[in-house]
Amino acid sequence: LGPETVGVLNCSDPCITFLLLYITCVSAPVGGFFLESCHLSHNAAICSDRHLKLVPKDIPPTVISFDLSKNQISRIQAGTFTNLLVLKDLNLHQNQILKIDNGSFSNLISLQKLTLNNNRLVKLGQGTFDGLSNLLELRLNTNNIAAVSSTAFQSLIRLKLLDISQNHLGTMKNLYMMLQHMPQLQQFTVRRNKLKHFYSWEFTNHSLDLQVLDLSNNPIRDFRITNNIFPNLTCLSIGDPFSVIKMEWDVKNKTFLRQVSSIDISGLHTTLQVMEELLETVNTSLTSLAANGIKHNRTKLINLACSIPTLSQFQFRRGNLRIITSDFLKPCVHVTELDLSENHIKTINENAFKSMEKLTVLRLSQNKLSVVPSAIQTLQNLSELDLSNNLIGTVNCHDFSNQTKLKELNLKNNSITLKDCVFKDLVRLQVLRLQSNQITDLKGAFKSSLSNLKRLHLNGNKLKAIRNGEFNGLKSLLNLSLHQNQIETLDKYSFVGLIKLTDIQLQSNALKKITFNLLANLRRLDLSDNRIQYPENATLTELPFSNLSCLEELSINAQHHRGKSTLPSNFLQGLKNLLRFSARNCQLIYLDKDTFTYTPKLERLDISSNDLQTLSPEHFAPIRNLKSLYISRIALQSLDFLRDAKLTKLKFLQGRHNQYSVITEDVIKSLPSLMYLDLKYISFYCACDNAWFINWTRNSKQTLVNGAYNYSCNYPDNFKGKKLLDLDLKPCLYDVNFISFVSTSCIVCFVMVGSFAYHLMRLQLYCAYYLLLSWLFDSKYKNNQAPHQYDAFISYNYHDEPWVMGELLPKLEGEQGWRLCLHHRDFQPGRSILDNITDAIYGSRKTICVISRRYLESEWCSTEIQAASYRLFDQKKDVLILVFLEDIPTYMLSPFHRMRKLLKRQTYLSWPRAAGQPGVFWEKLRKALQTGNDPSEENVLLTLTGT
C-alpha cells in the first residue's frame, strides 16, 4: 500500500508529523512480544478469520495496517482504537457490525483507508466518522444502510473515494447529505441501491470535483441534469440489467458532460432514441464504451457507438452473438481495442475486421471458435490477441501470417496441436500463453522462430520429455513455465539457446535427474513436486548447478519417491549467489555439514517437514547472512545448536511441530535480530525451566511470538492442556540452583571443618559435648533431687557379678558398713531401666564402675557410666570411682573413660595390681568412698598404668 493509492498526510501539519516521529522513535522495538489473537507482519496487525467478537486491545501502537476482516464483531464502541495514532489502513470487512458508537474512530488521526464492507449497518448516525479528517478511502458496500445522518460525514474533508454500493439508499437526500461534507471526493460508487431517479438539483447545489460516478444496477427511471455539477467527470456507469422500466435521459446542455471519456451502459434498458441521446451527449469526448449484456438493437447500437470519432475502446460482452458478419463492425474504423468475450461466437467472416485497420487489441475469449479466425489476417497492426477458452484444435502455419506486430498471444484452455511453422511470422511476439492445451509434443515449434519472445507459458499440458534444442530459437526468453506437465526426461541440451532465461518453473512433473548448466543467467528455478532422490550420501560427479552462479532462488520441495533421501554435500556447488533455498518435505534424513559451503549469501532457508532430528552449528557456519529459517516438522530435539550458530542477522524463525519442550535464555539471546518467532504446536514443559522464555514472551517488545497465547503445556501431567502463558512463575523467583550450590557448599565446609576439629581437638570436643549433655540431664533432676539413700551405686556387667557378690559386697557392706545400690536388689520393678539407673546414680553419693572388657562392650553399662559422667561434668563433683578388674590398654577405653582420665587421673583403682596386697586395695576404696565430692580433695589412690 503506497501513496499512489492512499495518498499521504499533509506535510504542512507539523503536529501530525511530530507525532508520527515521536511514536516511531519511542516505540522502537527492543526485545519479544505476542498478540493474543493476531500476528504481525511488516507493521501490519493481521487478525482476520479469528472468530473475534471484540476488537483486541493488545495491538502495538506502531502498526500501520490493521486487518479485522471475517470475524464476528457486532459493535464498534467508543475508545476501541485509542492508541493507534499512526494507523493508516483499517479493514473491518465481513463482520456483523450493527452499530458504530459516536466517536469510535476519533483517535485514528492518521487513518487513510477504512473498509466496512459486508456488515449489517442500517444507519450512519451523528459523529460516526468524527476525527477521520485524513481519511482518503471509505468503503461501505454490502450493508443494509437506509438512512444517513446529516453530520455523519462532516469530518471527511479529505475523502477521495466513497463506495456505498449494495445498500438500501432510496432517495437523493441521503446522497446530498454525504456529498456536502466531502469537497475533495473524486470517486463515488453507489451501485446496487434503490435509487429510482437521479436529479442534479437533489444531488448537490454546487459543482463537484467528482471524476468517477457509478450508478449502475439501480432502477433509475429518470436521469436529469440541469446544472453543470460534474465539470471534471471522466467516468460514468449507469444501467440495470434487471430493470423492466425504460430509463429516460435528459441532459439540458451537452457541455455538462464534456469531460466524460469512459461510460459503462451495460444492461441499460431504454429506447434506441434515448441511447442515441445519451451517446450524443458525450460525442466529443468518449474514448471507452462498455455495452455488455445488451441483446436488443445490437447492430444499431454498434452503428451509434462507432460513429463517435473519439471512441477507441469498445467492450461488447455477453451480447449473445453467434456470428460476426462482414458488416457488423464496419463502422468501427477508429476502434483500437475490441472486446467480444463471453459471447457464443462460432463463426467470424473473413472480412469482419477489414475496416478496423487501427485495431491493436482483440479479445475473443470464452466463445465457441473451433479454428483461428482467418479474419485476423487483415489486422496488420494487432499487438494483442486473446483466443483463450475456445474450442480450437489445430493451429495451421498460415493462421498468424501478417501478424508481424503481434506482441501478446493468448491460446490457453484450448486443445491445440502444434506445428513447427505455426509461429514463424510472429517476429515481435513477446508473450505466448499455451497452458492447458493437452500438448504432448512441441513439434519443433520453438527451434527457429520467436526470437523476441520473453515469456512462454506451457504449463498444464502433457509433455513427457524436453528434447535437445527444443527452445533453440528463443534467444530473448526470460520466463519459461513448464510446471504441471508429465516431464520425466530433460536431455543434456534441452535448454540450449536460452541464453537470457532468468526464470524457469518445472514443479509438478516426474523428473528424477536434473542438469541446468547451460542456463548461466538463471535467477529462479522451481523443481518442487518431482521425483528427485539421492539415497546415499555420496558426492556428485555430475553437478546439476555448477554453472548457475547467478541463481538466487532454488526450490526442490515435496519430492515424491519411495524411501528416504539425503542431500549430497556438493549438491549446491556453484550457487555462490543463492539467496533463497527450499527443500521442504523431501524425506531427508541427513544434511552434511558442508552442504551450504557453496552458498555464502543465503538469506532464506526452508528445510521443514523432513526427518533430520538434529542440526549442528557447523551447518550454519558458512551462511551467517541468514535472515529467515524454517525448521518445522523435522523431529528436532533441541534448539541448542543456535547458541553457537552465530546467526546474528536472523529475523524470522519458524520451528513448529518439533520435539523440544524448553526454550532457554541463551538460545534466544544468540539471535539478537530476531523479529518473528513461530513455535506453534510444541509440547511445552510447564515448569521453571521455561520461566525465562515465558517472561520474555510477555514483556519484551522486539520479537513477535506468533500464536503464543495458544501455546499449551504437555508436561507434567497435572499441567497438561493448560496455557503456557498462564503458568504461575512466583515459585520460580528463587534460583534453586544457586540455593542448592550455597547449601551444599556450606555442608561441605562444615564437614571439612568438623573433620579437622575432630582430628586435632577430639578430646576437648568430647569434653564440651558431654558438659552440655550433663547440664541437660542434671537440669532435669537436680531440682527433684532427694537426700542420698545410698553411699554408692555399683555399676557392673552380669559376667562380673561373682566378683561383686563374692568380694566387693562382703567387704563394703559387711565389714565397712556402706549402703550399696545393686541392680537386682534395689531397682524398682515396673519402671524403665533408664529411670532406675538415673535415680540410682543421683540417689547415691558415689558411683563405682566395675570395669572389665565385657563391661565396655555392654550397652547398658555404657549408659550407666555416661549418666555418671554427666553428673561429674555438670556438678564438678568427684562422684565417679573406676575399679578395673583387669588390665585394659588405653586405646580400648571408650571416650568416657579417657575423659575421666583426663580430668582426674588419681581416681583409678586396679584389682590386678592389688593382688599382692588386697587389704591396701580395700582401704583405698574405703577412703575414696569416705572422701567428699570436691575434686580438689587429696586422695591417695592406686593409679592405672599401661598404655
Image (tube, grey):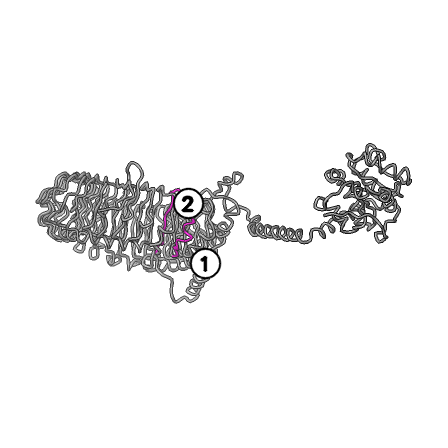
Q: Earlier in the sequence, mark 1 or mark 2?
A: 1
- Badge 1: few (under 14), some or many (20 or more) residues near its Cα, within 10 Å? few
Residue 161 lies in what quarter of the image? bottom left
631 within the magenta span: yes
Write the start and end of the magenta stretch as one range: 625-648
Disc on res. 30: 1
Where does the image place residue 6, in percent across and percent down from the top left? 35, 57
How many numbered marks, from 0 up? 2
Where does the image place residue 166, in percent across and percent down from the top left? 35, 46
Is residue 294 visible in the rendered image? The answer is: no
Disc on res. 486: none
Q: Nearer the viewer, residue 734 or 314?
A: 734
Where does the image place residue 918, in percent across and percent down from the top left? 84, 42
Instruction: Find disc 2 in the rendering and name its residue.
Output: 95
Report whether 377 appears left or right of 251.
left
Image height of 929 relative to 203, above or below: above
Where does the image place residue 54, in percent across and percent down from the top left? 47, 47
Residue type beneath disc 2: Asn
Question: Measuring 72% from the left and 46% from the top, which residue is drawn there?
Answer: 890
